[in-house]
Image (cartoon, rainbow, N blue to C red):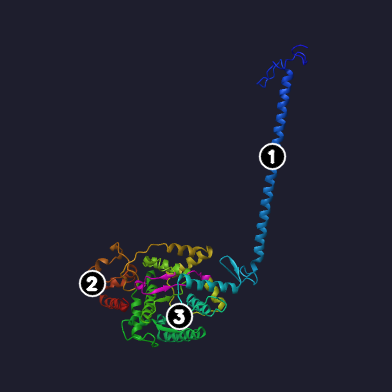
Amino acid sequence: MGDGGFGMGDWDWAQSPIPKSPIPHPQTPIKNFLIYYIKAQNIYLIIIIISIILMETNKEENSKINQDKNNLNQKDTKKSKKIKDKNVCEKCSQNPSKIYNRNKFLCLNCFNGIIIHKFKSNLRTCCKIRQEDYLLVCISGGNYSMAMLELFHQSFNDSNSSRKLFFKIKILYIDDSILLREKSKIIEERQRRKLFLEQKMKEYNFDLDIIYLEKVMNLNDEKINLKENNEYENILIEKYLQMLDSISLTGGYKTKFIQISINNLIFYYALRNKFTKIAFGNNGQGLVQQSFFNIITGYGKDIKHNIIHVDDTYLNGRILIYRPLQDFFDKEISLFNHYHKVDIIYPVYKDDNLTKILSAFFGKLQNEKIHTVPSVINTAEKVVVYKNDKICKFCLCNLDKNKNKMEFGLDAFLNDENCLLNIELCYGCRRMFNELIQDFFNEDKKEKSSLIINDILNMFKSLL
């Protein structure tokens, strides 16, 4: 055959190299055929391999999708189980749930056990109350303090617990019935409160002392007997109410004045009876509201100490204030009181507008976001507080450092050494007595205001 045929006789296999180019060579048709055949086979193999790989990947993806679907189904079943089990207590898994607290459905027994355990844990770890301590427990008769009293009673008489409380406590109640102002109402209210508290103390087996608020006007008398209470002491009541009326109506300072009067009367009783540790019934939400109230009224210098479990700012640490209910919410206190049918004493003095606004604001915020109160407490605990050895002569807290004299308004007049108002008061107390200070420089009101200021200066001399 010729060169262009397919015959095998004229083909020289040894001398004809395989062309590198894929383009067919006109003189080597069989060789080109073989090359294309081999290439085609390789392409088919590659296609087969790729198809196999794709099939395997599809299988893996399908298996993953199936696994995800199974996981989602399992989660849905778990959620449905949780929804189905919401009528059963999540702690004991036996009793029906009655309370929803801190994202948990609990029965009454488990809820009560958790509250008591947390209270005892706070006393032991946060407040560090020891076996030999003698604790002064101060109550106001409200929701928080009466809940604290019930918690002390149950903690001392808890037979199921392995850890018992062995320290001693004394109950102190400050009667503020004089804020009713009318003599007949004051006497009637005092008798009613006395009977109520005496019955409670018999039930709890606690010792109780009742002190009337007007005693705060006579603390410098060494012969004063705080426990000997007359139903109505006209002179002391008139002095206190006159001083209260001289406080500014705006800004919640009347409420602050009453709080400071009650606290200082408690401190006087504690020092006189050799108490160094005092327990108050403030809970977390109440402490947050009080901290913002103090900031607004000018007492924000001690915001850290006013919100933590142990407060040592009063009288340079001579007295320690403990707050075992700091971790409790209003909802928990209300549920606990409702469960145990705890009776309370309703206050005679209505809250000012500032207190109402703060209470409504934080109450709504806490109901919407449960971490509101803990977040504020954790933030306040990180505040760096300036410490001063000097104390305010009225509120008995650390005296804040004056950086700007203009912030006091009348501080220029106070620099006079002969001035009656040249006293050591913190910024908040100066704002409290601002109207009284202005009356001092008014010719018509100077005599009356000077007498009231003298009473203020002499109120807590015995504590300094």
Q: Position of residue 206 (x, y in %)?
A: 48, 83
Q: Position of residue 265 (x, y in %)?
A: 37, 79
Q: Which residues are magenta?
A: 309-331
CB under 8 Å between discs 2 and 3: no
Q: Which residue is mark 1?
A: 54
Res 381 visible: yes
In this picture, is 243 found above or below 307?
below
Mark earlier in primary sequence (2, 1):
1
Q: Position of residue 275 (x, y in %)?
A: 39, 79
Left/right placement of residue 296 relative to residue 405 reads right
As shown in the figure, which amino acid type bears the numbered disc 1? Answer: Leu
Q: Residues within 10 Å of mark 3 (few under 14, many from 20)?
A: some
Mark earlier in primary sequence (3, 1):
1
Picture quarter with the N terminus: top right
As shown in the figure, which amino acid type bears the numbered disc 3? Answer: Ile
Left/right placement of residue 148 relative to residue 183 reads right
Mark closer to the observer (2, 1)? 1
Q: Secondary structure at mark 3?
A: strand
Quarter of the image for residue 114 reads bottom right
Tell which residue pokes out farthest to the front in this image: 14
Left/right placement of residue 421 relative to residue 349 reads left
Q: CA distance from mark 2 to mark 1?
A: 96 Å
In this picture, is 391 found above or below 189?
above
Q: Position of residue 164 (x, y in %)?
A: 52, 77
The residue closer to the viewer here, 333 or 312, is 312
Which disc number belongs to residue 169?
3
Q: CA distance from mark 3 to mark 1?
A: 79 Å
Q: Which residue is mark 2?
A: 419
Q: Residues within 10 Å of mark 2 (few under 14, many from 20)?
A: few
